[in-house]
Amino acid sequence: MLKIYKSEDGVLVEAQEIEPRTWIDASNPTPEELHNLAKYFKLPVETITDPLDVDERARCETDEDYNMIIYRIPTFEENEAKGFRHYFTVPLGIVLVQDCMITICRRDTNIIHNLFKQKNKHMYVKHFPYLILQIFWQTSLTYLSDLKDINTNTSIVQRKLESSMSNKHLFGMMAQEKTLVYFTTSLRSNDFMLDRLKRMAFFRKGLSEEEEDLLEDVIVENRQALETAKIYNDILTGMMDAFASVINNNVNQILKTFASISLVFAWATLIFSFYGMNVTIPFQNNKLHLVLIMAITILTCIVMLILFWRKKLL
């Protein structure tokens, strides 16, 4: 879907057609819309389609006719079966061409919507680097917010695992760990891209002192999100290792208990097996031989159970 925005009196409003100094937002675009954009701006098709590749890394490149930035942004899908959101990252492409800006993403994310919800809605489209920095700033805030939600979900799953070692909960922990790996990788690539972007002439040209401070703030927030993701990932990895040790310990405890009980029943089986043989054995001529055998067997088993209990084998 394509949306066009322009600046009227410093306020970003929706427009009906493409004109100079407009921003074209292509969220979850159709192949026909991408083809029309490439044809209108005379761009190579791969320039428009690269941001749709989910594995595309964060980078920036320049050409005689256009400049392109690819930034990894967070998004999510609701997962009713697991009871919490499934987070992952996708590339957002930003193309500066012919006095216009094009943003391309395979999903309709909250990053763009949040730009219109913030208190300061006076975003000047005539100066695209400022608008790009606002997108980066909203991305960093979204990362931090999503990381808090992931940490909350992890705590909920942890409490459930403490009471019940269910495979469902273990898979939930594995999904959270996978998400943090994606976040860490994307934030690291964003950090490298921002460092390079600081040195790019097409972006630094015309930045005011306030906008340079905003760029530094974006870099700091991105690194803060990266460090937070690393910490959460390390905690979750340690937690998964701890739960694996607990599961192994529980299995060993169960096997030890079963082995002890098997020894007790094996002793009883051994005694009755002797009396089932066609040989001379004690008490066979006694009228109460069955009672005596059972009494001896039960007493022996009780003694073995007490010994195993004192040795903490039961």
Image: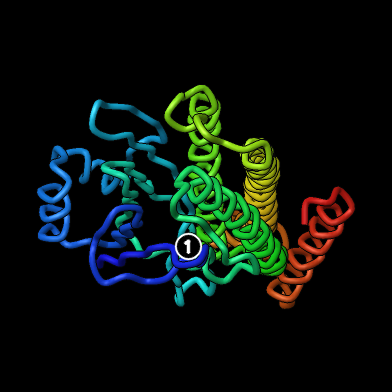
Quadrant holding the C terminus: bottom right
Q: Mark 1 points at which residue?
A: 86
Instruction: Residue 136 in the image: state x and y as whole percent.
Output: 53, 47
Residue 251 seen in render: no
Q: In this view, does 303 lie to the left or right of 267?
A: right
- Name the residue rendered at 35%, 56% in the picture: 23
- Name the residue rendered at 55%, 52% in the picture: 134
Which of the two residues, 234 or 16, is positioned nearer the viewer here? 16
Kindly indicate the quadrant of the structure image that contains residue 209. Answer: top right
Q: In this view, does 305 lie to the left or right of 44?
A: right
261 w.r.t. 55: above or below: below
Which of the two residues, 62 or 250, is positioned nearer the viewer here? 62
Residue 295 seen in render: yes
Dot 1 lies on which element?
strand
Quadrant holding the N terminus: bottom left
Q: In this view, does 307 lie to the left or right of 223?
A: right
Which of the two residues, 284 or 13, is positioned nearer the viewer here? 13
241 w.r.t. 152: above or below: above
Instruction: Residue 97 in the image: state x and y as whole percent.
Output: 28, 41
Which of the two residues, 157 or 204, is positioned nearer the viewer here? 204
Instruction: Residue 185 in the image: state x and y as whole percent.
Output: 50, 36
Give the amino acid type for the residue marked by disc 1 in the picture: His
- Name the residue rendered at 48%, 40% in the picture: 186
310 w.r.t. 96: above or below: below
Instruction: Residue 300 in the image: state x and y as whole percent.
Output: 79, 59
